[in-house]
Image: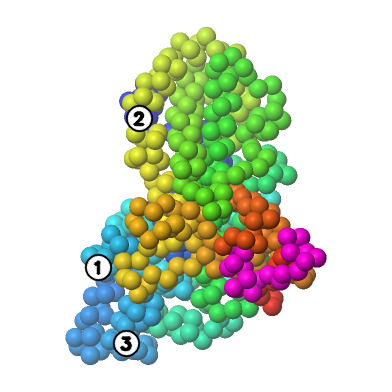
Amino acid sequence: MNLAKFKDEPWKTSHPAYEHCNLAMSPAPEYASSEVILSSLYRQIGLKGASEGSVPQTGRLLEKEIQKSRNRSTMPEAATLDANTFNGLLHSVLESPKLPNQSAKRFLQVTPLIPQAAIFSGSARLSSNSWPAGGLVRRMIRLGSPNQETANKLWRDLFDALSVSSGDDIFARFLKEEIGAWAPTPTWNLIELEADDGIDEVDLQGLDYPAKRFVRDLDATIAAKDAMTRRQWTSLLEAIIRIAAVAHITWLCDVHARIWECVRSTLSGNAPESADEVRSRIYPESFQYFSYGDKALLGIKDRASAFLQARLGLNAALWAAQEVGYQNASLSSAHAIVDLCSFLYSNSEKVQQTGVNDTLVEVSERETRTLLCKKGIGSNIMEFARHVLGQRQAANPVLRGYDQGFALRKRGTSNSSPWVVGLGPVAILALVHCSLAGTTGPRSVRRLTQHLAGYGMIIDHRDIATNDLGHQLRLLGLVLDSPDAESGMLLVPPFATGQENIA
């Protein structure tokens, strides 16, 4: 691969330094829902041998076996339910709503209440090439943890929480045995979190970013498991994952655009002088991705578009540097970026002779639709954000209220109504709990707004008393109105346990 081949196929193959960067967008996001991410997480953390691509086929085979048993009036020896009852369990009690454009498709889709259900349900696609959405959570845990040891501990704690044990409610334990009888699964064992030596922990030290906030919130969510049923807990977990995942992807888009700005500035003759300068330029001190009550997708689209332009620019610069003789290039730390910029600056004439600027201009003009997120990678990022954050639009009207952990809601009832930032009841419960983790007693609603800011969601604490967030907080019993409190409202811990002893 070289600059000429990159010019012909700019999206096909990235430069190794870009592809293996510790801040690479890996896995590359596509369509997913919160349930798809949780199902994939089950497979990533404890179901070795259960691949993403095998899920649709396993679901079809299970449907056939159930139909055979119904026709023959038989059932597995270890099963408690007959075939008709088990079929009703999957298609009624555990049914997860299909999207309106999936209403005519026949496939098995159930709530990912327990790991065993992830064997036959919860794939991003109905084909064999689904992306591993759960790998995104694994990546966020490693990136958000201060070191590998801390990440390993949280990964093991998450595995224990996702396991169905004697501490879970009786329905979850029953499902584990029943689904295991009808659909034998791989043994549920911990798949260790692989070491990632590419992460520069010094670069990220002292910074606030979505993955770091997610790691703390995940710890708090795990601590609250014993205070509720498994279905309630998995709903809280999904709510935190979906907000953190989209915020993380948006943050990565922002960082990539800032790295490209450094490199582009160097190509124009202004190289950064030190690693500290690069670090301050590529990592945002604060970020505002979603404004509560306003449209959200346009802001995400702008950042996705900037990311795509950065991807083209960085790859073009890396291929050009390689042609000039730069070896072992890297984008995984501020020091590595300074080294790249210093080389480009010192060899500016040779780099310009490769035609890197003309190549970039030509490719950008040719790939306008992709850069505008109308197809390809950008379209996938937008679809990911819309379906992960947005309230599930159910094909079956009966299941219209199924999703309550959303962070985007329709402003009206029309299909063309815009998506605006607005938290569902479950998301509010989860965020209030996490914002109060490590405290005792009530706190001001300002603490919640500061917590939301950790994910780039902006809301003025003075507006809460009069907007729909304040209304829902009152309905859920999560606030005390007090004239002595800031804004007249105090947050109340939603659960009896899990608030203390969390850093």
Residue depicted at x 41% and y 16%: 358
Q: Secondary structure at mark 2?
A: loop
**Which sits earlier in the primary sequence, circle 2 or circle 3?**
3
Q: Nearer the viewer, residue 457 or 187?
A: 457
Residue occupied by mark 2:
367
Cα distance between the residues tagged 2 and 3: 53 Å
> Residue 327 versus residue 124: which sits nearer the camera?
124
From the viewer's perspective, is 370 left or right of 199? left
Span highlighted in magenta in the image: 469-488
Q: Is residue 349 left or right of residue 383?
A: right
- Disc 3 residue type (three-letter): Thr
Name the disc covering residue 106, or none: 1
Quick check: marks 1 and 2 in contact, CB under 8 Å? no
**On the image, numbered disc 3 is attached to which residue?**
85
34 versus 227 height, above or below: above
Between disc 1 and disc 2, whose residue precedes?
1
Three-letter code, disc 2: Glu
Left or right of residue 276, residue 101 in this image:
left
Q: Given the image, on which type of amino acid does mark 1 rest?
A: Arg
User: Label 1 vs label 2: CA separation?
Assistant: 36 Å
Displayed quadrant of residue 337: top right
Is 449 magenta? The answer is: no
**Front label number (2 vs 3):** 2
Sequence-first tag of 1 and 3: 3
Question: Residue 282 placed where, x, y %?
Answer: 62, 34
| Residue 427 visible to the viewer | yes
